[in-house]
Amino acid sequence: MKEKNTVMKKIVENMSRVIVGKEGPARLMVIALASSGHVLIEDVPGIGKTTMANTMAKSVGLSFNRIQFTPDILPSDITGFTIFNQKTGEFEYRSGNIMSNVILADEINRTSPKTQASMLEVMEEKQVTVDGKTYSVPNPFMVIATQNPVEYMGTYPLPEAQMDRFMMKISMGYPSRSEEVEILYKFQKSSPIRELTPVVTSEELLDLQQQVREVRMDQSLAGYIVDLITATRRHEHVMLGCSPRASISLFRASQAAALYEGRDYVIPEDIRDLAVPVLSHRLVLKQEAKIKRITNESIISEIIEDQKIPVSVK
């Protein structure tokens, strides 16, 4: 497991050559990548969301495509379309922007619900259907979506079904004073991302994703995950709790977190550390909770504190 641990940390270290002071979000993103999951980054503009996604793609030698979502973008722009070739007399498939290893869905809440829905099949099934025919996306495949929480004019909030497709929601936050000074000098002459080279091959990444699935999870810890999920459904301030897909996501992410630390088995801390980024965005709060300014994150943190940690973990 030490070798796989080195692979994951190598990606984060390479990302740190461009991204300053964001090892925590970078670690979460690499854990999601190793877990074959998708990530939603919700934060204010200009703090490096696009750079973070591009840096990770370059670090693992994967193809990268950025889709700028706007109100006039169509589902066919995402999935592709068929066109009649007069020379051959046949219809040909022209791939859309989704046909890449890492997709940055920038400002996904600015496009129409119909276009948002076109992402659902791709994120879950890793394929697109155009005119009755299915086409597989490249493997590995990951969607990193961004949305700005401060701009609500002309936006379409993601529905619960779409939010549930994301393994994690990450917030990057503003850099500290010293970090922002370092950023100024790092980008003084040119963007350091241009000089970034891959540190992991796509074959190594696929092998890593398989290794994650083999990390041992004690049955008591699997029950602990289910207890956390069940508590979200019974919480007094929650109208809609986490789904079984959330259980699977927390299970898989915890396996990747254990592997990141060089272990081939999961411990309770792996689950507790990831519960907020994996579960919080899946909750729908009651109106009175919103009035009291109770947040999704605070509810998950409260549930973590209330649930007993399994004592016997083999």
Image (cartoon, rainbow, N blue to C red):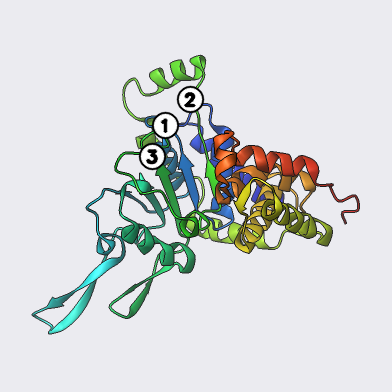
Residue 30 appears left or right of 74 = right
Determine which of the numbered discs, if any, sits on residue 174 in the image.
2
Residue at the farthest front position: 288
Image coordinates of residue 311 in percent, x first then y, are: 90, 49
Residue at label 1? 44
Residue 237 visible to the viewer = yes
Q: Which residue is at a point 56% across and 51% down the rendered structure image?
A: 282
| Quadrant into which the C terminus falls | bottom right
Determine which of the numbered discs, if any, sits on residue 110 in the image.
none
Q: Which residue is at a point 54% across and 52% down the rendered structure image?
A: 33
The residue under label 2 is which amino acid type? Tyr
Q: Earlier in the sequence, mark 2 or mark 1?
A: 1
Neighbor class of circle 1 (other Cα within 10 Å; few <14, some 14-19, many 20+) is: some
Image coordinates of residue 312 in percent, x first then y, are: 91, 53
Image coordinates of residue 264 in percent, x first then y, are: 75, 54
Residue at label 3? 50
Q: What is the secondary structure assignment of the residue under circle 2?
A: loop
Tag nearer the camera, 1 or 3: 1
Q: Nearer the viewer, residue 209 or 279?
A: 279
User: Marks 2 and 1: CB-CB under 8 Å?
Assistant: yes
The residue under label 1 is which amino acid type? Val
Tag nearer the camera, 2 or 1: 1
Q: What is the secondary structure assignment of the residue under circle 1?
A: loop
